Amino acid sequence: MGALMLMVLAVCVFCCRAAPVSNSLQVGGSPVSVQLGHTATLPCWLSPPQSAEQLEVRWFLPGGGFDSPVLLYQRAHLEHGSQYAGRVSLGLKDATSSGLREGDVSLKLANATLQDAGDYSCYVSSDKEYDRATVSLVVTESPGPPPLLSAVWITGVQVNLSCESEGWYPRPSLRWADPLKPLTPQSLQYSTAPSGLVSVHSWILLPASTRVSCWVEEQEVRLKLQEPPQGSEGGGAAGWAAFGLLLSAVLLAAAFLLYRKRGKKAKLPVEENQKLLPKGKIEPTQISTARQSYVNVKPEHNGNEYLTIVQNKIRDQQINFPDGDQVTFLTAITGTPSLSSGRHYWEVSLGNSTTGLKKFWWVGVTTASIRADSHLTPSSSNGFWFLSSSPTSLQLSTESSVALLPLPGPQTLGVFLDFDRGELSFYNVEKESLICSLTAAFTVPLFPLFNPGKGDRAPMELLQRKVEAEQGGGNTESKAVCETEAGSG
């Protein structure tokens, strides 16, 4: 094979029959920095470009040694070390690369752990010659997502609040705050995943009428609770109660980065962080009024290979999904018609006595077209407003998530959109009760959003009525004003 022509950025000495060849390997961007849990590409390539398809490519760490490679490409076959199973492959140094055909032998490492940091040797050889270069990988801290708050009534005068967040490195601080006095939680616990990412969970008992904030590092979720009305359906500790929930996520990316950069708090008042639109609290519409604006929505047949759609019934394909069991955009779909003004109400069946209730689903509205491979976070800042279900809770897609307890959820979900007023409300149709209502400033057309989840027996069905349809639509800044049903006890 012809000589491998390139400048050697790192040279090693091996007891090897092949003679080392200078000017053959090139690396770039060393050290490579990656956040814990994210994906990194360690660039290494032949220059001038030439095929590496018939060469041996070996990536290894000093601790593992030459004979225990992280990745080995040999005779068109890939092997990897046991601790890197499913996480390493040959990658591309940039978007224009043609891979092995042009001598790109870069290493792609997914879900980076703390143990992955180190100096990686890129070793390329033929029958006659070899060369080696080194790329350093640095694994940096990972700020987690905004905290998740959940609330459940214990008695008519007390509420149990939980605050949790996951995906942090290093271990984050969590604190509860009250405008009038310091708060001491009943519990504060940390757990560490195999990847090294840290989760934190805390709970606290507070009076039923209170204002409280939960801080995880510089990310705050603020909550205002009002006493449940007397004589709620079911009454007492065993019944349901409606309470008002005022949520505002007061994290700005700029403030957070400023804090990380300067090593101190960036104190920005709520009013500067988030516009509360529309001004003033909007009282949620009663379900009896909402039903007067019934519109027959239908699923959009967009060729999603992971869904089956028959007569307004939507279900997943019951297969092994490439992105795992978590509910993602892969099984999401929009509906028709588009909604750009006026009032609109529709109903979605989420199970029956034969199949049981669905465990996983999304129902709401969106401004976006759905792409199965989308890496967007499905939240209000990205044009998604919906209620979702998991086996443990219902949850809103606000920037700082709010879990609505308890389950089971509704068998039939009612959705009401008042585009001009900026209201989106969700109802338990059988109970004729409000689950949750949020407000937002809608400015562009909206589309009904549906996701039947993965693995449920029960389909999701869009219920059709003999009514006149209205028109509708929306977008962007959200004020999460929630009226939620919560179980006491």
Image (cartoon, rainbow, N blue to C red):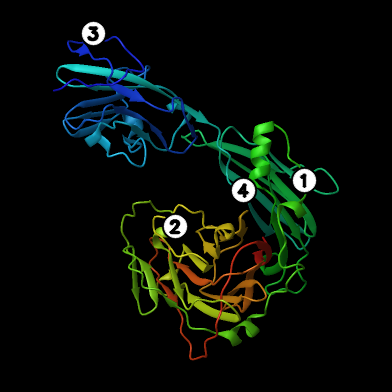
The residue type indicated by label 2 comes to Val
**Crowd band around label 1 with a 10 angstrom C-alpha radius: few (<14), some (14–19), many (20+):** some
Nearest to the eye among marks 2 and 4: give it. 4
Q: Residue at x 56, y 59 (%)?
A: 393
Nearest to the eye among marks 3 and 2: give it. 3
Decide which of 109, 392 is in the foreground and name it: 109
Decide which of 258, 365 is in the foreground and name it: 258
Residue located beneath label 2 in the image:
327
Residue located beneath label 1 in the image:
177
Expressed as whole percent of the image width and height from the top left, the position of residue 313 reads: 39, 75
Spatial CA distance of label 4 from label 1 is 16 Å
Spatial CA distance of label 2 from label 1 is 33 Å
Q: Earlier in the sequence, mark 2 or mark 4?
A: 4
Q: Earlier in the sequence, mark 4 or mark 3?
A: 3
Spatial CA distance of label 1 from label 3 is 64 Å
Residue located beneath label 3 in the image:
15
Q: Quadrant of the C terminus?
A: bottom right
Expressed as whole percent of the image width and height from the top left, the position of residue 216 reads: 66, 42
Spatial CA distance of label 4 from label 3 is 53 Å
The residue type indicated by label 3 comes to Cys
